Amino acid sequence: MYTLKAPKYFKSVTLTLFVLLLSGQTIAKDWLVDSPKAYKKTLEKVKPGDKVILANGTWHDFEIVFKGIGTKDQPIELTAQTKGQVILSGQSNLRLAGKHLVVSGLVFKGGYTPSNAVISFRRNKEDLAYHSRVTEVVIDNFNNPDKRESDYWVAIYGQYNRFDHNNLTGKRNKGVTVAVRLDSKNSQENHHQIDHNYFGPRPILGSNGGETLRIGTSHYSLSNSYTLVENNYFDRCDGEVEIISVKSGQNKIRNNVFFESRGTLTLRHGNGNIIEGNIFFGNGVDHTGGIRVINKNQSVKNNYLEGLTGYRFGSGFTVMNGVPNSSINRYHQVENALIENNSFINVGHIQLAAGSDMERSAVPVNSTMQNNLIFNENSQQPFTLFDDVSGISFIGNVANTVAHTKLISGISQENITLKRAENGLLYPLDRKFAEKGASKDLSPILKSATGPHWYLKKNNLVAFDSGKVINVKAQGDALFNAVLMANEGDVLVLADGDYDVRKMIDINKTVSIKAKHQGKVKITFQRSTLFQIIDGGSLMLDGLVISGSSSPDSSGNTLIRSQKWGMVENYRFVMRNSTVTDLDTNHSFHFFDSGAGAFADYIELTDNHFSHITGDLLRLNKEIEDLGIYNAEYVILKNNSFDNVAGTLVNLYRGGTDESTFGPHLDMSNNTVKNSGKGKRNKTAASLYLHGVQVTSIESNNFENTADIVIEHTVGEPKTLVKNNDFNNTATVSVKELYVKGSHTAVLVNNKNSK
Ligand code: CA
């Protein structure tokens, strides 16, 4: 089944064709195949210049091996009958091996790879791909359902390969999205090109292993890679602290856009990398960062960074301290770094000699920061110096703020007014600053110029209340059925009345459940759990009265929980204006319990009343292996009252010493807590138990007759603020540093203690 592709000159130059045929030259053929078997047979026959075309439709469980030897002028192609209409689903993947191969038009979705990569530029360790290209391919939410199982979406081996115009969206399980591997001689000095790709949203992983692009590994980091990464769009790539982790030498990263992505481009290992013409738009989003410099001979020029809030190793710009005679996997000293003509506009933090400690004591040397533009609308100068920075020469930099006292000679304070130019970037109006900061001819790559044009760049996150409004009556299984029938984003509005729910309600979509009249909807439930959030689910409750009075008379009931084990999709849970009471049919009746492997983007409780609960309120403590994994990124409690909660209000646990995450965060303000945390079965014996939480704010709450607040700091320089609280007959706050020597770093101010 194939068609002959006649050359354009077929009629006019029949003689030439005849001669070509006689001389044994092949004519390119198109081979349309409609089954894996036909594909395999065809592959044995293809010649340089041929095209293997997969028929439109869904190919389930198809592990493609694309092996062949094409030529520069006549590559062998693998493509779709219609680009975008060949879907690889189930346990599918693609391996390329040989030379001059081109793959295009395929979509991987609705499954995951059974191997360690969806697309691999090698068949096995010996058989790699060279001079090959993968273009206009989509990998969309193609995730192992066990989030802790690690795989790459794309593993690039060999040399002179190109990966371009692809769309990679929604990687949720562990493992780097695109990894350039340098693990053998044949994959080093590779000259790969990674360009015009759309790196779509990668949600927070909640552990290490969420990098979007990694080039090399520490083991081979003194090898050169010569990989070019240009004109890519990184859209909310939030996986972990490293968006790009460069771990090899002589790479160029240029003209990429980083849009609202949490984390940084990190020059983690390897020397002589060039970072040029990149644009970072943070838009004030939490933990948006820029560039982090480590190692020798790094050049950071003509980059534009705006609206970045990140701090510490996630800052808008960081130059690290090194370890003297560092082992290959620690921190090599910064030497001969050139940091020139960058614009740092509303970049909250620029940190120099960062990470300085007993081990990391080698300060940056022989380096230069010159002609950079630094502008902070809030008039706060952004520099923090953690050690001696005399090894960095500051020349000709300008700022609108008074510079850090130690940098004053190399950063002059100027009266700078900025104006947004046609390219969307801010530049000083005054021409005397024309040579400062990023150049005017930068042209940020447009999202629309990346990825295949035929595949929609979706926002995977469905907002609450973005769907239809559905009215629900207080009768029979109406609530259960309404949730079952609801679509993404729908709002179920409950009529006044009593709802005694017979069956556990699974939440597998984004749905809001609201009382038509606040306080007039009373829900009781007969199973051990009322709502279970499962993969794909997010829940908002508003204005309800929920009672445990008709729940089973057994211990361990839970009003709301996430699926007991292994969710791959992050969820959100919000409750407002509601009353939860009488969770006391037996002991250990909890309000909310996370399953192991579940991860909440946020949990928000605002303006609620909780009373008479025999168990815990929020149990976010299921990652007990101490691997830096945790259950919720943001936990927010505002304007609630808690009375007689026997267990722990918030048990939030991130164990271990890993530093690849920004969270968890706890924000607790304006709550009233009474008679809580004092149950004899409360295992933490605390009202709040926070272990390894990175950002904590406990402000303006009233605690009365309540158990201790226990805060255990681990690594990562956690920020803890306990301010303006009233503690009435309540043990005060206990803060412990578990790893760092010396006194704790929490800020406790203006709290009132009374008996
Ligand atoms: Ca990492």
Image (cartoon, grey):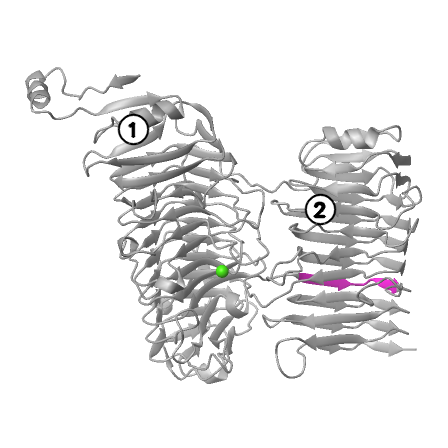
- The residue shown at (30%, 50%) is 192
| Number of residues whose C-alpha sits closer than 10 Å to that of mark 1, classed few (under 14), some (14–19) or many (20 or more) | some
Residue of label 2 = 564
* Proximity of marks 2 and 1: CB atoms separated by less than 8 Å: no
Name the one closer to the observer, 143 or 603. 143
Q: Is-magenta flag for residue 399?
A: no
**Residue 301: percent from left, percent from top:** 35, 65
Q: Quadrant of residue 755?
A: bottom right
Up-down: is 585 above or below 15?
below
**Residue 684: percent from left, percent from top:** 79, 66
Q: For disc 1, does the CB lie below 8 Å from ligand 1? A: no
Type of amino acid under label 2: Lys
Q: Is-magenta flag for residue 671?
A: yes
Left-right relation of 448 to 659: left
**Residue 243: percent from left, percent from top:** 47, 57
Mark 2 vs 1, N-terminal side: 1
Q: Which residues are magenta?
A: 665-673
**Residue 268: percent from left, percent from top:** 42, 66
Left-right relation of 542 to 658: right
- Classify mark 1: helix, strand or loop: helix
Residue 446 visible to the viewer:
no
Up-down: is 138 above or below 288?
above
Up-down: is 120 above or below 64?
below
- The residue shown at (46%, 70%) is 318
Residue of label 1 = 43
Residue 268 visible to the viewer:
yes
Type of amino acid under label 1: Leu
- Classify mark 2: helix, strand or loop: loop
- Main secondary structure found in the magenta portion: strand
- The residue shown at (85%, 75%) is 731
Up-down: is 161 above or below 629?
above
Instruction: Report how far apart the C-alphas of labels 2 and 1 lie in the structure.
Output: 46 Å
